[in-house]
Image (tube, rainbow, N blue to C red):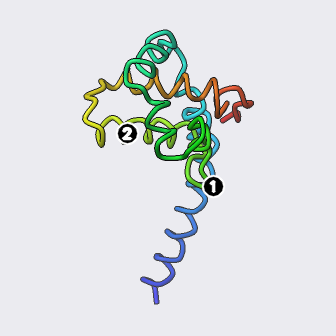
Amino acid sequence: MIGQSLASALTGLTVWLLCLAAPSAHAQTARLFKGADLALGEKLIAEHQCAVCHARRAGGNGSGIYRPQGKINTAGLLRGMVDYCSTELNMGLFPEEVTAVAAVLDRDHYRFESKPVAKP
């Protein structure tokens, strides 16, 4: 009996703590690209011919690859997708290069960083 009450209390506490942490996590994620080297990102996108690959995969000019339904809806997921592309295509991008490329994509297509940041 005491074990069930304790488990229930801990579950409630965990949910409460997650609710408190959610705005803080959003605020941190929303600034993921702060200070990113946009010129480097643009250079890497051109150098690795990202638009060519995107056109091959999505058709047309390749812009259809951006904002796939329900897939990329945060700055962190965008950065993760760029990291995935780097790994899958054996580009060997360093973490700061991945961030630079993702920051350019955010600026030009997604605009996560331009949305208001939640206060913790």
Between 74 and 92, the residue placed more toward the observer is 92
Q: Which mark is residue 84?
A: none
Q: Quadrant of the C terminus?
A: top right
Q: CA distance from mark 2 to mark 1?
A: 18 Å
Q: Which mark is residue 85?
A: 2
Mark toward the start of the polypeptide (2 vs 1): 1
- Tell me where residue 114 sits by quadrant: top right
Between 2 and 13, the residue placed more toward the observer is 13
Looking at the image, residue 48 lies above or below residue 26 = above
Residue at coordinates 56% horizontally, 36% vertically from top-left? 75
Q: Amino acid at mark 2?
A: Cys
Q: Report whether 1 appears left or right of 74.
A: left
The local secondary structure at tag 2 comes to: helix
Q: Amino acid at mark 1?
A: Gln
Looking at the image, residue 90 lies above or below residue 96 = below
Q: Residues within 10 Å of mark 1 (few under 14, many from 20)?
A: few
Between 114 and 51, the residue placed more toward the observer is 51
Q: Report whether 44 appears left or right of 116.
A: left
The residue wearing badge 1 is 69
Residue at coordinates 37% horizontally, 24% vertically from top-left? 48
Labelled pair 2, 1 in contact (Cβ < 8 Å): no
- Tell me where residue 88 sits by quadrant: top left
